Amino acid sequence: FPLKPQASKRKMIIMAASVGSVFFAIAILIGMVIIDGSIRTPARAEKITGLKLFGALPEFNPAEENVDIRYLEDLLLEQMHGNMRIEFYERALKDKLPKIINIFSYKIGEGKTWFSTKMANRISDYDGKILLIHPNEKQEIALDTVLIEPDKPKANVHEIIYDITHEFISTVSIAELLKKHNLSFNDFGHIFLEIPALVTHQIPVNLLKETHLAIMILDSHTVWTPSHQYAYDLYKRAS
């Protein structure tokens, strides 16, 4: 991750989410439109994935425009938090604790940890103690994908970093995973569970069965291939 914004145009991160078997989409628009086979725009993302748009950040070039990045980011995170609360309310999950949110992507470097940490920090301002679970996965996110220096978890955001092993993939439940770290399942209001990249690792099926909301992150420059579709379909089957 860079400490300062780079001088190139930002990309677009698309996030597709689900509650149970009902899927919808979240999008952070940080991108330039390119004429090729990539995701490119929200409309194209909706067409390719069959999901709907949930939120957006406008395109800009930090080398040419005077943009308050933090302000735009705050607006987007607030919008996304509000939409998540509405989704939980409409599905009679508003009193369900903890709420389990899965973050996943096709490959590493698309911003899973960047997003989940920021969202966990934002929700912790409103809803108390949060648990952030993410893999010890080499971060290879492109320099021009990140807007600003990544956040560190706040004091009331507890963090678990796990090694991607057969033992983790076979974990029976989130409660079992927490027990290994001397934590209680009921101590948290929200749990962000980031799983390893779909293209390189198996899916922890047992853990996905406990998920209330899932968010898929995609780079707008991604060319959606049969491999992407296969991985996405496999994820849906597992969840």
Image (cartoon, helix red, strand yellow):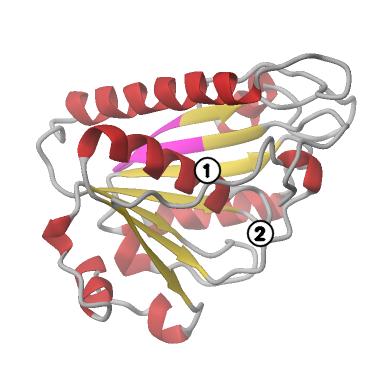
Q: Say which of 173 and 232 sits in front.
A: 173
Query: Horizontally, is 202 left or right of 18 in the view?
Result: right
Query: Horizontally, is 65 left or right of 200 in the view?
Result: right
Residue found at x 18% / y 49%: 98
Range covered by the magenta-colored residues: 16-24
Q: Say which of 237 and 216 sits in front.
A: 216
The answer for how far apart the CA atoms under marks 2 and 1 are is 13 Å
Asked whether residue 144 is in view, the answer is yes
The residue that disc 2 covers is 108
Q: Residues within 10 Å of mark 2 (few under 14, many from 20)?
A: some
The residue that disc 1 covers is 115
How far across and how far down the image is residue 26, in percent?
50, 29
**Please, what is the three-letter code of the amino acid marked with disc 2?**
Ile
Rendered position, 24 above or below 156: above
Residue found at x 30% / y 68%: 206
Q: Is residue 22 magenta?
A: yes
The kind of secondary structure the magenta stretch mainly shows is strand
Query: Which of disc 1 and disc 2 is earlier in sequence?
Result: 2
Asked whether residue 56 is in view, the answer is no
Element under disc 1: helix
Instruction: Determine the image quadrant of residue 9.
Output: top right
